[in-house]
Image: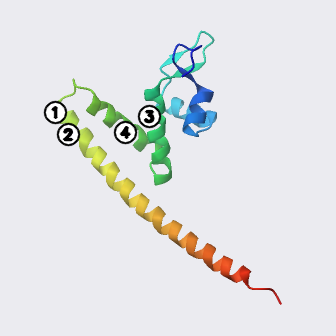
Amino acid sequence: MSTDTGGYLQIGQVAERTELSLKTIRHYDEFGLVQPSARSAGGFRLYTEADVSRLLVIRRMKPLGFSLAEMKQLLDAVDVLDDETTTSDQRISAATYLLECRDKARDSAERLRRQLSYAEELTELLTARTATPLP
């Protein structure tokens, strides 16, 4: 953690830790997916470990085909489940949505595994074909 920012991380540090670009992090901020927890005296975005964790969830969702709206809904559902003041109905609705997201993630992961298998098969085929000397 950076000591000159009072324990907060600057956006560049967050980008490095999450492997997301500055532009992407700013876009997620504009969309309301993750907002900086503070601002420096100069107006720079400052993030906490919890903010970094949210960004890592988003980063995991992106390759699985989740839209920004679905990402926001999932993060909101997590917040509902973490908030002890939410009603039983809110908690049930949030948990139900998380189960839907889990199923979508599982299906997407299976599709990606299949695509990876095809890519590996093609790579092996091309390696075998290029290993043969040309006439």
Classify 10 Å Cα crowding around label 3: few (below 14), some (14-19), many (20 and above). Answer: some
Question: First in sequence: mark 4 or mark 2?
Answer: 4
Say which amino acid is labelled 3: Arg
Above or below, 13 against 20 in this view is above
User: Which quadrant of the view contains residue 131?
Assistant: bottom right
For the residues marked 3 and 4, what is the alpha-carbon distance in whole angstroms?
12 Å
Q: Residue at x 44, y 49 (%)?
A: 66
The residue drawn where x is 61% and y is 76% is 124
Q: Give the CA separation, mark 4 to mark 2.
A: 14 Å
Q: What quarter of the picture does the N terminus occupy?
A: top right
In the rendered image, the vertical position of residue 114 relative to residue 13, given as above or below: below
Gap in Å between the C-alphas at discs 1 and 2? Answer: 6 Å
The residue sitting at the right extreme is 135
Name the secondary structure under disc 3: helix
Q: Find residue 54 and name its label.
A: 3
| Disc 2/disc 3 C-alpha distance (Å) | 21 Å
Image point 28% across, 49% down: which residue? 99
Q: In the picture, residue 98 is in which quadrant?
A: top left
The amino acid at mark 4 is: Gln
**Residue occupying image coordinates x 78% and y 86%:** 133
Task: Identify the secondary structure beneath mark 2.
Answer: helix
Seen in the picture, residue 105 relative to 114 is either above or below; the reply is above
- Residue beneath label 2, please? 92
- Amino acid type at circle 1 is Ser
The disc placed on residue 73 is 4
Q: What amino acid type should be assigned to the residue bearing mark 2?
A: Ile
Few, some or many residues within 10 Å of mark 4 (<14, 14–19, 20+): some
Could you tell me if residue 33 is visible in this image? no
Helix, strand or loop at disc 1? helix
Q: Tell me the residue that label 1 is attached to.
A: 88
